[in-house]
Amino acid sequence: MKQDFLKFPLHLIVRPFDGFWDMKYEGKGKLKVALLILLALILTTILQKQFAGFLVNMVDPRSLNSLDDLEFTILPFLLFCIANWSITTLMEGEGKFKEIVMATGYALLPIVLINLPMTFVSRFMTQEETAFYYLLNSISSLWFIVLLFVGIMTVHQYTPAKTVLTMALTVVAMGFVVFIATLAFSLGSQLYWFIYDVYREIIFRT
């Protein structure tokens, strides 16, 4: 149990090539661990907006809404996994949807590990020390991108060049899905109000 929840994720983020290989071919990755990391990311994001020092926290406390954090973390996560699975299915990728979800979830771990302590440390920072806060947050984001790249490459058994291509196509597919969803929502909303107006017109004339 300790191996699943602690040792393996820490091993994976410092030795990603070995870690993602073990996840795919040795069965060491666990879907529930990847989802717990996603949940931890949501919690650390909420804590960061609530408790980060005022020198680095530009969020208006009156506009905080934890449901927005939940929505804007889970939806991009699922959107990336679905878009990547759709693209790689057409490009001879060997990865399964479950493996894409696990690779993406494990890749988020550096953000969780760095953002949480930095949230509380930031409360004691001076203006000159805030550069370290932004530097470490940037490192966690870059670390996430590298892990995601290696994870997707290993899961699908792609070359680096093909991984870059599929990642770019995944981003395009995500934008396309968002555009279609927005268009469908807009058309659905207009259709609803059209039917509602027709209904009211009929009621008033009868």
Image (tube, rainbow, N blue to C red):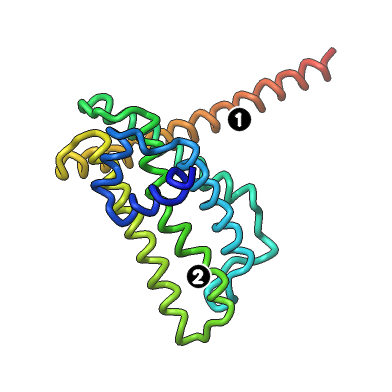
Q: In percent of the image, x 48 and y 47: which residue is there?
A: 2
Which is nearer the eye, 117 or 126?
117
Which SS class for mark 2? helix
Closer mark to the observer between disc 2 and disc 1:
2
**In x, y percent, where is residue 137?**
42, 66
Left or right: 81 as drawn, with respect to 122: left
Q: Residue at x 44, y 58 (%)?
A: 111
Residue at image mark 1:
189
Crowding around mark 1 (Cα neighbors within 10 Å: few <14, some 14 to 19, many 20+) is few
Residue drawn 55% across and 51% down? 42
In the picture, the quarter occupied by the C terminus is top right
Judge whether 42 appears above or below 75 on screen. below
What crowding class fits label 2: few (fewer than 14 Cα within 10 Å), some (14-19), or many (20 or more)?
some
> Residue 71's quadrant in the figure?
top right
Res. 33 mark: none
Q: Residue 58: which quarter of the image? A: bottom right
x and y, in percent, of residue 185 in the image: 55, 31
Which disc is residue 118 wearing? 2
Report the residue at 50% width, 37% height from top.
Answer: 32
Q: Secondary structure at mark 1?
A: helix
- The three-letter code of the residue at mark 2 reads Met
Instruction: Give me the C-alpha separation between circle 2 and circle 1.
Output: 43 Å
Horizontal arrangement in the rendering, residue 154 relative to residue 203 (left or right)? left
Label pair 2/1, CB-CB below 8 angstroms: no
Image coordinates of residue 37 in percent, x first then y, are: 49, 48
Q: Is residue 203 above or below residue 99?
A: above
* Relative height, residue 56 to residue 140 (above, below): below
Q: Say whether residue 92 is left or right of residue 137.
A: left
**Amino acid marked by disc 1:** Ser
First in sequence: mark 2 or mark 1?
2
